[in-house]
Image (cartoon, coloured by chain):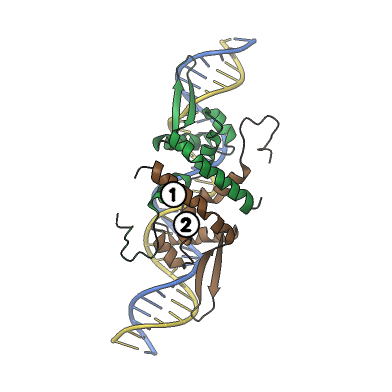
Chain colours: A brown, B green, C blue, D yellow
Amino acid sequence: MESCDQTHEPRMCDAALKRAFTFLGKRWNGIILATLQAGPAGFTELRRAVSGISDSVLADRLAELVAVGLVQRVVTEGPPVSVHYNLTERGRALLPTLEELTTWAEANLPV
Amino acid sequence: MESCDQTHEPRMCDAALKRAFTFLGKRWNGIILATLQAGPAGFTELRRAVSGISDSVLADRLAELVAVGLVQRVVTEGPPVSVHYNLTERGRALLPTLEELTTWAEANLPV
DNA sequence: CAATGCTACTTCTAAAATAGGAGTAACGCC
DNA sequence: GGCGTTACTCCTATTTTAGAAGTAGCATTG
């Protein structure tokens, strides 16, 4: 990747911020993470909480968040088998930033 | 809005956070805002800085950010006419959060 | 014990968003 | 006058997202 050439760079390229927006820059991911702040939730519970999301996209997003290690998928063997999703430590570490974002939005984004 | 019913709400719905992710949850918007941190920039300068974005989407995003009042489009009458984009006060107010996000990503997202 | 409902998905198709390139108009440079 | 730059718009192709339907396992109801 030659995109981060420092020899005469006119503007910085925040590699870390770009990584963050790889998933935060997709619809629903931020909301899913914030929803999980309230504790573990199952698929249906999440679908209800994140109103407007479709099953297929929620499944996709959860898989993605699990893949990057922000969310944990926990299966409790039954019967009945139950599945729930949980924030990992890395995921929880993002919560203060999301709260700051909420505060900013309250002050700066009109309803 | 009946989506924020508190009578037996299983999970909160951060209306403000949702508003924030209306545009942050779209590809490029976060990066554009962070790029503008370094000062005003013209269209071509932004396209170069935000590597990977296409002309049509950059134009779209800028119009969106101008519409929500986070970015200002300033035309300097010439000739030659020149255009540059600038963060508004509201947009600048978001920068500390973006920095925190960067710090989080550096610590929590593998390269 | 069959009918219905819930959970946690997957699969399909349609609609929307994004990418990539070409085109345009105004101006500067040589 | 020919070429380059800026700041876009427009068009088409690919990718993403939405929305509905289907599936498999288990529990509840009558």
Q: Is residue A1 left or right of residue B35?
A: right
Give the quadrant of residue D1. top right
In the structure shown, which secondary structural element does the residue marked by tag 1 occupy?
helix
| Disc 2 residue type (three-letter) | Ala
Q: Locate the C terminus of chain A and report the quarter of the image it occupies.
A: top left
Taking the image as shown, residue B22 lies to the left or right of residue A74, namely left
A81 above or below B19?
A: below
How many numbered circles does the render carry?
Answer: 2
The answer to whether residue A34 is seen in the rendering is yes
Q: Around disc 1, counting alpha carbons within 10 Å, would you say few (fewer than 14), some (14 to 19), or many (20 or more)?
A: many
Q: Nearer the viewer, residue A88 or B52?
A: A88
Q: Position of residue A78 (x, y in %)?
A: 51, 80
Pointer 1 residue:
A102
User: Is residue A70 depicted above or below B41 in this figure?
Assistant: below
Tell which subunit mark 2 falls on: A
In this orientation, which residue lies closer to the viewer: D7 or C3? Answer: D7
Q: Which residue is mark 2?
A: A34
Q: CA distance from mark 2 to mark 1?
A: 10 Å
Can residue B22 be seen here? The reply is no
CB atoms of marks 2 and 1 within 8 Å: yes
